[in-house]
Amino acid sequence: MRRATVIRDLDFHPDEGHVRCYRVPDPGVLVNDADMYVRQSREPAWGEGVGEQLVLRHLAFSAEWFKINATYDLSGNLIETRPPDGAPFALNCDISTPMVRVGRDVSAVDLFLDVLVSLDGGHRVVDEDEFAQAASTGLISAAEARAAERGLARLLSWLQTGRLHDLLDGIPPAPVATAPEPLPVELVPLSEVPSVAPGIRRTWSGIDQAKASPLRA
């Protein structure tokens, strides 16, 4: 019997001493090419008006300074969830470094800024204070801070023009009901993931790995 393969999705938050590792089995991978990586998993639901479970789709790009997290019900409808301490949103967009591939691994660095988007297209930028502090204390480099601000502007442009929703709609069809349950998140030592390490990761010194891509307008 063929053994299922697993992709490691490595997510580094610079104020943490480890790297979050999301292990994704093949059935959860919808797109995995040079430009974009998309995974989905079935998650416990939270918030009023949502069933017992929802499906989270996560999109990362090799040429963009952000990642997208979209929530769906089990019928495939984009839905809003409401955190206990905030307003509802359907998309949680993380400003981050572009996706890096090493073998079957994909990795990126969270750059603190987030954009929360509601179903009606309204949005709000959050965690700006954390971003400013990270930039001023050296948790992220000056080059990364500048690129993060450009990435935020580009993401907001995608929202205003409808490009982001067109991208979500264009993901190859796969029933959300087939999304696998998530594997336990692991914590990996930062020393084992040099692609996200401060001082040596590619984006630290201002080498922008974003390249010409079909995703770029």
Image: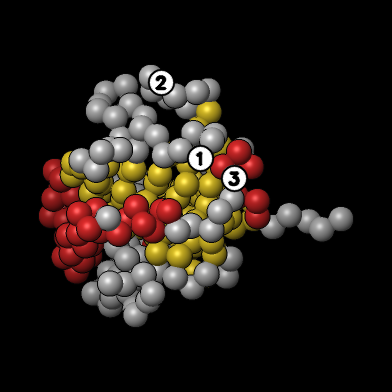
Badge 2 element: loop
Q: Which residue is mark 3?
A: 175
Q: CA distance from mark 3 to mark 2?
A: 21 Å
Q: Is residue 76 left or right of residue 120?
A: right
Q: Residue at x 21, y 62 (%)?
A: 154
Q: Three-letter amino acid code at disc 2?
A: Gly
Q: CA distance from mark 1 to mark 3?
A: 7 Å
Which mark sits nearer the N-terminus, 3 or 2? 2
Task: Name above or below for residue 182 compared with residue 196.
Answer: above
Q: Which residue is mark 1?
A: 76
Q: Residues within 10 Å of mark 1 (few under 14, many from 20)?
A: some
Q: Which residue is mark 2?
A: 49
**Residue 179 location, x and y as percent?**
60, 42
- Mark 1 in CB contact with mark 3 (< 8 angstroms): yes
Quarter placement of the C terminus: bottom left
Q: Please indicate, yes or no, whether residue 79 appears anywhere in the rendered image.
A: yes
